[in-house]
Amino acid sequence: MIEQIEGINIAVEGCFHGNFDEIFGTIREIEKQKKIKIDLLLVCGDVQTHRNKHDMFNMACPIKYLSMGTFYKYYEGKEAAPCLTIFIGGNHEASNYLREMYFGGWVAPNIYYLGDSNVIQIKKGNTTFRLGGTSGIFKIFDFNNPKLEPFPFKSEQLRNVYHTKQIDLFKLSLYEGEVNMFLSHDWPQQIHQHGSTKELLKKKQNFEADIKSGRLGSQPHKFTLERLQPDFWFAAHMHVKFEALVKHKTGRQTKFLALDKCIAGRDFIQVFTYTKDKKDLYEQYAYNEEPIELFYDSEWLSIVHTTYKLLTIWDKIPKLFEYNPVLKELQIMKKDKYEEFLNEKRERMKIFGNHQLKIPHNFEVTTPPYDEQDNTIKGLVPPKRIPLNNQMKSYLNLFNESGQELNGLIFYEPDQPRVIGEFVAPDFLQKQIELENQKEILQQQDLKQQQLEEPSSPKDDELNIQDFPFLQ
């Protein structure tokens, strides 16, 4: 008799490299062999979400390696992901498309991009966990660059754009809640010290010089690892499987796992079950059939709202971190200003309270997908305009922001002036939620009356984003 376990069956994959058919095929084969249903696939970058040739030429890669891939089939709905798929960006991406989804969004049905940095909540039945992540790889010269790349990108910017930026680390540094799992592309600096360096060097002898010099891994990721102390950290980039156990001074532990790229015979995928008791099981799997759902995290929304003022000056953000050569670590500059941001975030958290806002399934096809009959070779030609994506418009409405301050950052309307608006008062959302609470009470009364008349009618107890007119 199969033991019934409450939990979420999770597959983690390393570097995707556009292998949608192959990796989704692997998921289906695992399901068949183990007689289970994979609920969630977590991907650690280099996904290559090319909708068309223009997206392909927005990927930093030698021209001889450029490939259209098969993502466009999933984008236009000809193919479907076998399970909910969530990913962060690496250093080989359709950078223009991911920039349009700066705050996170659906790049195709059932395929969700976490954004440049994010924390969301994932729920299935009685099992809930927080997933955090940050995209790109670390280069010190771009990390401290006070200016983010203007949109649309020129060819020389296709590498700068995927480099980790200080604004994303700053947002993560403001997070004080518990994060259960975290995704990155490259590794946290010095992570090799918490695993078998000897075994790692057997597989990758060329790592030795970087290990000795301290260059292996990302300084911002090391900062985030020590700050958030997640239960699990998944990464890729180095094309090798590596495991480590980080024991923090607080008594918490982080299980680190890096995975390879999708090649037969290589360790590019790991399957486990995450239970409602926060255990990870590798020989037992969950069989509960509840749907898996995504929710915005109220603390992260508060952070985005608080730091939005920094994004409105995306072309001249002040320096937020400095590197201490003695301690060999990044440190926050201007601690008093940081405390101001922290306190403001805490005040905004009171506005959101314990409300759970579902992430809406609001994906739309926004550009023509690849035409398989098109044999032309087109290089990178900046488009005349890139409208604000409908998902980002909906997300910014959470804060009553139009996004016009981000013209040139996440969309491109050259004929529209870039608007610098007033920062929204903290009580705006509070007033809106109070109004919606009154509406919800009336709706519940109507629902009860309907249930008396139609006992079989469905009921939804969750607070859904679709229930808020001001969020539409």
Image (cartoon, helix red, strand yellow):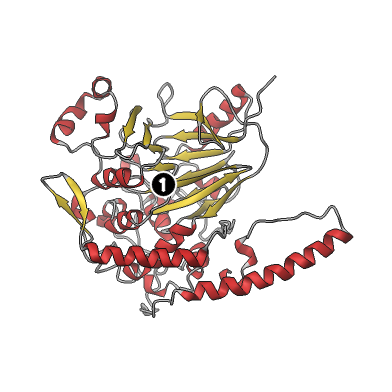
User: Whole-percent x and y of residue 255?
Assistant: 38, 33
In the image, residue 48 above or below residue 281: below
Name the spot of residue 18 as percent of width and height, x first: 44, 40
Q: Residue furthest front?
A: 250
Q: Label 1 sits on what residue type?
A: Ile
Residue 470 seen by the camera: no
| The quarter of the displayed image where residue 321 is located | bottom left
Q: Identify the residue position indicated by label 1 in the image.
A: 88
Pick the residue in front: 294 or 21: 294
Which residue is situated farthest in the right direction here? 453
Q: Residue at x 37, y 35 (%)?
A: 253
Judging depth in this view, the residue of 300 and 470 nearest the camera is 300
Quadrant showing the N terminus: top right
**Whole-percent x, y for residue 348 in the image:** 44, 67
Indicate left or right for 429 with 195 as reference: right
Dot 1 falls on a residue whose secondary structure is: loop
**Which residue is pictured at 58% across the width and 56% down the height?**
358
Q: Is residue 324 above or below residue 269?
A: below
Quadrant occupied by the C terminus: bottom right
Task: Please tell me in which quadrant of the rendered image residue 426 appears.
Answer: bottom left
How many tags in the picture? 1
Inspect this view and state whether residue 418 appears.
Answer: yes
Q: Is residue 211 left or right of residue 285?
A: left
Q: Residues within 10 Å of mark 1 (few under 14, many from 20)?
A: many
x and y, in percent, of residue 114 in the image: 45, 51
Query: Foreground residue, 304 or 25?
Result: 304
**Residue at 40% over, 42% down:** 183
* Placement of 24 over or under 336, stated as above or below: above
Q: Residue furthest left?
A: 326
Q: Residue at x 43, y 76 (%)?
A: 424
Q: Can you say whether 98 is above or below 32 in the image?
A: below
Q: Quadrant of residue 257?
A: top left
